[in-house]
Image: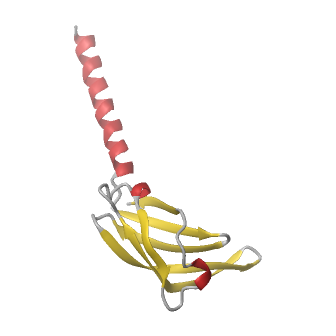
Amino acid sequence: MKLLIFSLLASGAMSAAVGEAGLKVKRSTACNCELHYGDDIVFSNGIPTLPGLITTKALYSTPYGNGLHRIDPNACRIEWDRGNNPTDCSTWKQYAGPNGGACPKSVQKKTTPHCGGVD
């Protein structure tokens, strides 16, 4: 009987630990999002996981040889729709942009976003 009770308690504790770890993956406090245009990347980091639309300043990265990239800070703006589940970064959609004075015309169109959570 003691073994059965111990087994049940241990099983419950392990389930709780696994459940909490699973929630942490989905409930990020911020997201890093990238838009890829060939070798060029427009990206924003540390975007808060709150509901609604948000406009972010984005960095523009372009390769210039030898595997190196040149990064222009705050060159572009992107508006993100964080949807009904804002803590799951993979559900975010690009609402508008990238655009802005220093943002190259070649990247001012929609593409598939790659968003991942950070804590």
Q: Is residue 6 left or right of residue 42?
A: left
What residue is drawn where x is 40% and y is 55%? 91
The number of discs equals 0
Q: Nearer the viewer, residue 114 or 45?
A: 114
Residue 50: quadrant of the picture:
bottom left
Looking at the image, residue 51 lies above or below residue 97: above
Looking at the image, residue 105 lies above or below residue 47: below
What residue is drawn where x is 33% and y is 61%? 29
Quarter of the C terminus within the rendering: bottom left
Point out the residue furthest to the top here: 1
Residue 7: quadrant of the picture:
top left
Q: Is residue 65 left or right of residue 51?
A: right
Q: Position of residue 13 (x, y in %)?
A: 28, 30
Residue 49: quadrant of the picture:
bottom left
Q: Position of residue 66 (x, y in %)?
A: 77, 76
What residue is drawn where x is 23% and y is 11%? 2
Q: Position of residue 51 (x, y in %)?
A: 27, 64
